[in-house]
Image: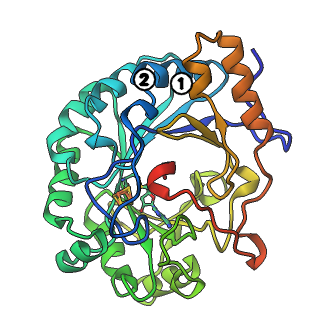
Amino acid sequence: MSSLVDIHNRRINYLRISITDRCNLRCHYCMPKEGVSQFGHSEVLRYEEILRLAALAVKKGITKIRITGGEPLVRRDAVQLIQQLSKLSGIQDLSMSTNGILLAEFAPALFQAGLRRVNISMDSLNAVKYRQITRGGELSRVWAGIEAAKRAGISPIKINIVAIAGFNDGEIWDFARLTMSEPYQVRFIEFMPIGISNEWSPERCLSTEESKRRIETFRPLIPLGNQKNGYDGPARLFKFPGAAGEIGFISPISDHFCDSCNRLRLTADGKLRTCLFSEEEVDVKLLLRSACSDDDLEKKLDEAIARKPLRHGVVGGVIKRCHRPMVKIGG
Ligand code: SAM
Ligand code: SF4
């Protein structure tokens, strides 16, 4: 069984699995107000199909799996899927991206099922602004989710903020200072031109350099040398002297990390995608539903990896949008 190495010699060891395109929020930058047309029930991969593909991918060298969506916790029995995935021998890291709205309810069961890490999206610390960007979300529920995850033993807890000029750029310091007393990893992500929403423009993308500058006006940051080149995955890590938590910057626009990209994505409707910004997809659903052999599936995985582009479409100031909305890709 060949392992997953692409033609640019990048070893692919990270699989993001989107289990639904449904969501209980409507974040402005992720989907339009009216929502997006949803996959029909039969279009979405069943858990046994996801597990079969994941098991094969793990045999071929995937060691990290992240469950995402849409909002993964709105899909029934997501905890059971986590439990099954955690049993795959070879998985070293199993995590989830969630908006946190349902996390208070599920955190203990997720921990029991084997989930050890969670990334929670929270784009404002102000309840009114949070409700505005998510079109109706309640910030207090996200905080309750964070607290419940902490109590359950899920660690690290990463808090993701899409840094948007004109929206939350006045809150960069407030987010950063949370790390002084709490062991969170607070991560600022550059706003990306994805999907059909018209909210993105270069001016609205607050660069890592600018977010970092705003923080350092208040207090200097120490780069963390414990990860290779100061990176943890694509995040560049820092902390304040004596702080409980860490601060990360993810810079897909100003400092793309394509050279070291190790990711493969599986969408909820059974398409393999090797780059967030590429429209190229390899369908595995048809195969999974056609009594295929593991060899056939393995060939599909190899085919997808062979098509992984060297660079994404936002390199060198040229903006090539990805049209599938993020909620249907899985961030
Ligand atoms: N619903 C879950 C959540 O919000 O964490 C998981 C899915 S969501 C699509 C995954 C991540 O993608 C979130 O952190 C979200 O903020 C991020 N995201 C969505 N659209 C984005 C964009 N245009 N630029 C940067 N990040 C984006
Ligand atoms: Fe839902 Fe996550 Fe998209 Fe917000 S970013 S609309 S929570 S999928």
Q: Ligand 2, what quadrant?
A: bottom left
Residue 90 in the image, given as x and y percentages of width and height:
55, 20
- Left or right: 79 as drawn, with respect to 193: left
Q: In front: 49, or 143?
A: 49
Q: Is residue 259 above or below residue 51?
A: below
- Left or right: 21 as drawn, with respect to 124: right
Q: In front: 120, or 25?
A: 25
Name the kind of residue labelled 1 in the image.
Answer: Ala
Bin the neighbour count of mark 1 within 10 Å (Cα to Cα): few under 14, some 14-19, many 20 and up: many
Which numbered disc covers residue 54? 1
Does the beta carbon of the residue at mark 2 sit less than 8 Å from ligand 1? no
Residue 84 in the image, given as x and y percentages of width and height:
38, 19
Q: Residue at x 41, y 17 (%)?
A: 87
- Left or right: 190 as drawn, with respect to 25: right
Q: Which residue is mark 2?
A: 85
Q: Residue at x 61, y 59 (%)?
A: 230
Secondary structure of the residue carrying tag 1 is helix
